[in-house]
């Protein structure tokens, strides 16, 4: 149990209940890899501050899983050789290039 400035006891608040954690830029720079591992493990975002103003958020990356790989398979239709020239004759408009 911790005591506030009035001397009244209170239970510590879990960071998981808050949904995010705040850390100063200097402390983040010092402990960057540890904080990144913690965010990955716990899933709780970290708000990075400079002079007590929020400047960045570190969020856990979404996991795409196996569904992401090959999700567009079968959505492209091959109609022919894309490198072969077209049969249509192209004419330039000399008035636009003068």
Image (cartoon, helix red, strand yellow):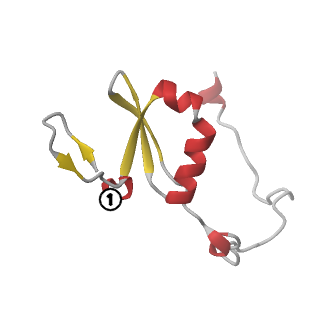
Query: How many dots with numbers?
Result: 1
Q: Residue at x 70, y 75 (%)?
A: 73
Front residue (pair 14, 18): 14
Front residue (pair 21, 65): 21
Rendering coords of residue 16 (x, y %) = 38, 58
Rendering coords of residue 18 (x, y %) = 31, 53
Residue 34 falls in image quadrant: top right
* Quadrant where the C terminus is found in the figure: top right
Label 1 CA crowd tier, 10 Å (few <14, some 14–19, many 20+)? few
Q: Is residue 53 left or right of residue 86?
A: left
Rendering coords of residue 40 (x, y %) = 57, 55
Q: Residue at x 76, y 72 (%)?
A: 78
Front residue (pair 3, 25): 3
Q: Residue at x 50, y 58 (%)?
A: 42
Q: Is residue 68 left or right of residue 24?
A: right
Residue projecting furthest to the bottom: 74
Q: Which residue is mark 1?
A: 17
Residue 97 falls in image quadrant: top right
Residue 33 falls in image quadrant: top right
Q: Is residue 84 left or right of residue 23?
A: right
| Rendered view: 47 above or below 40 | above
| Rendered view: 50 above or below 71 | above
Rendering coords of residue 1 (x, y %) = 28, 51
SS for callout 1: helix
| Rendered view: 30 above or below 83 | above
Q: Residue at x 84, y 65 (%)?
A: 81
Front residue (pair 40, 4): 4
């Amino acid at each position: 149990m911790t005591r506030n400035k009035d001397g009244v006891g209170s239970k510590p608040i879990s960071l998981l209940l808050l949904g995010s954690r705040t850390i100063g830029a200097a402390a983040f720079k010092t402990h960057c890899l540890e904080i990144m591992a913690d965010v990955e493990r716990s899933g709780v975002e970290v708000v990075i501050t400079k002079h007590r103003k929020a400047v960045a958020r570190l969020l856990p990356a979404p996991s795409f899983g196996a569904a992401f790989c090959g999700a567009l398979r079968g959505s492209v239709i091959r109609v022919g050789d894309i490198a072969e020239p077209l049969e249509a004759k192209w004419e330039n408009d000399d008035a636009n290039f003068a």
